[in-house]
Image (cartoon, grey):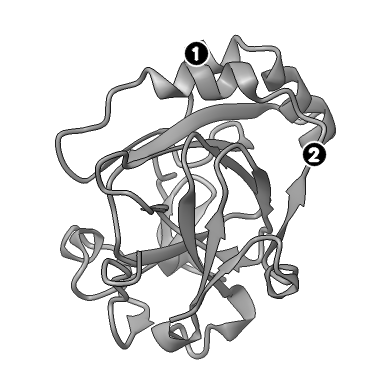
Amino acid sequence: MEIRSVFDQKFAPYGRVHEGYELSGLLAAMDVIPLPEEGTAYRPSIPELEALPVFCQFEGSAYGGMPVQLGMCWGRNTKLNCLEYHRDSEFNVGTEDFILLLAKQEEIENGALDTAKAKVFRVPAGVLVEVYATTLHYAPCHTDEAKGFRVAVALPRGTNTARPELEPSAGDDRLLWARNKWLLAHPESAEAKQGAYVGLDGENIDIKDQI
């Protein structure tokens, strides 16, 4: 699969690059958080990050005054495994270059998505990207195994926390995996084994031989 830059025009349907945010303090605070021994870690809200001045920019400039949270996904990963979407855009910035595997919500057919539709984009270190609400995404991939990845994740507050208790009855209820998080899992993924909706057909993409 071709790995394109987020500055490539082909990224435009999936998201866009943002400028004007004061990110140096955020990147420095993220950089001291140790990588997990294996796999990835995620925390939707990290108080030390939310105490930084840029948090007010996310609340005001990114989300227009909505309550937001600032957390992080970090570790090592080269596989697709799942794709998720929210009802809102997500903002990401990394301390190192990282890679996003993306698809479009409208490419889901009869409750499933062919993984061959996924596109691969590289985000340079320190570049803030918005991933649109209609863009399917999941855990970033590293570009250097020794360094792993540390990626900030800004979302409306409460997103990716405990799943609301409800019986599937309408819309995308069967895909709801956490609050404001609808998930399609690949059959090989750990999430599928935990009961997530299996909605990815085809290869579980692994980019380890392309980085």
Amino acid at pointer 1: Pro
On screen, residue 87 versus residue 60, left or right, reads left
Seen at 60% across and 31% down, the residue is: 157
- Please name whichever residue, 48 or 179, is drawn nearer the observer in this view of the structure: 48
Q: Is residue 158 above or below residue 145?
A: above
Q: CA distance from mark 1 to mark 2?
A: 24 Å
Image x and y of residue 57, in percent: 77, 24
Q: Is residue 26 left or right of residue 99?
A: right
Q: How far across and how far down the image is residue 112, in percent?
A: 43, 84
Q: Which residue is mark 1?
A: 47
Is tag 1's residue or tag 2's residue first in the polypeptide sequence? 2
| Residue 63 in sight in this render | no
* Residue shown at 46% from the left, 40% from the top: 96
Among the 4 quarters of the image, the one containing residue 156: top right
Estimate the x, y position of residue 168 in percent, counting from the top left: 43, 65
Residue 154: % across, % down: 60, 36
Residue identified by numbered label 2: 19
Q: Amino acid at mark 2?
A: Glu
Look at 29% across and 54% down and name the residue there: 77
Q: Secondary structure at mark 1?
A: helix
**Near-viewer residue (77 or 192):** 77
Q: Quadrant of the C terminus?
A: bottom left
Q: Is residue 135 above or below residue 194?
A: below
Between 146 and 134, the one nearer to me in the picture: 146
